[in-house]
């Protein structure tokens, strides 16, 4: 069985990530950790920002993975 870190590096290579989170400290931690695995990381702190980011990225590239907080203020992720 391959090391999970090596697997994540392979999967994330040349891929993008969209993080949707309203807590700045969590965004910072996730960015710091996951920047070792993904080509580019995009962040949004609201559902509207996330949808806007996703739509603009969709024209040229769809993020490989989206990590979303379940509760974004009064919104639901």
Image (spheres, rainbow, N blue to C red):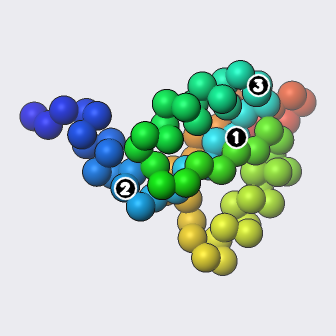
Secondary structure found at label 2: loop
Tell me if mark 1 has few (under 14), some (14-19) or many (20+) residues whose alpha carbon lies within 10 angstroms of its own: many
Circles 1 and 3: CB distance less than 8 Å? no
Question: Does residue 75 appear in the picture of this structure?
Answer: yes
Callout 1: helix, strand or loop? strand
Q: Quadrant of the N terminus?
A: top left
Q: Nearer the viewer, mark 2 or mark 1?
A: 2
The residue furthest top is: 25
56 up-or-down from 59: above or below: above
Q: Relative to residue 64, is residue 29 drawn left or right?
A: right
In the drawing, does residue 62 fall left or right of residue 74?
left
The earlier-in-sequence mark between 2 and 1 is 2
Q: Residue at x 80, y 60 (%)?
A: 52
Residue nearest the observer in this picture, 24 or 46: 24
What residue sits right under mark 1 in the picture? 20
Separation of disc 1 and disc 3 at Cα? 9 Å
For disc 3, the marked residue is 23
The first of marks 2 and 3 along the sequence is: 2
> In the picture provided, is 73 more to the left or to the right than 20?
right
Residue drawn 33% across and 51% down? 11
């Amino acid at each position: 069985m391959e090391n999970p870190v090596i697997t994540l590096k392979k999967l994330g290579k040349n891929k993008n990530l969209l993080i949707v989170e309203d807590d700045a400290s969590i965004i910072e931690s996730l960015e710091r950790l996951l920047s070792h695995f993904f080509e580019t990381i995009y962040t949004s702190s609201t559902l509207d920002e996330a949808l806007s980011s996703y739509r603009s990225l969709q024209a040229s590239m769809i993020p490989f993975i989206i990590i979303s907080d379940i509760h974004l203020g009064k919104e639901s992720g």
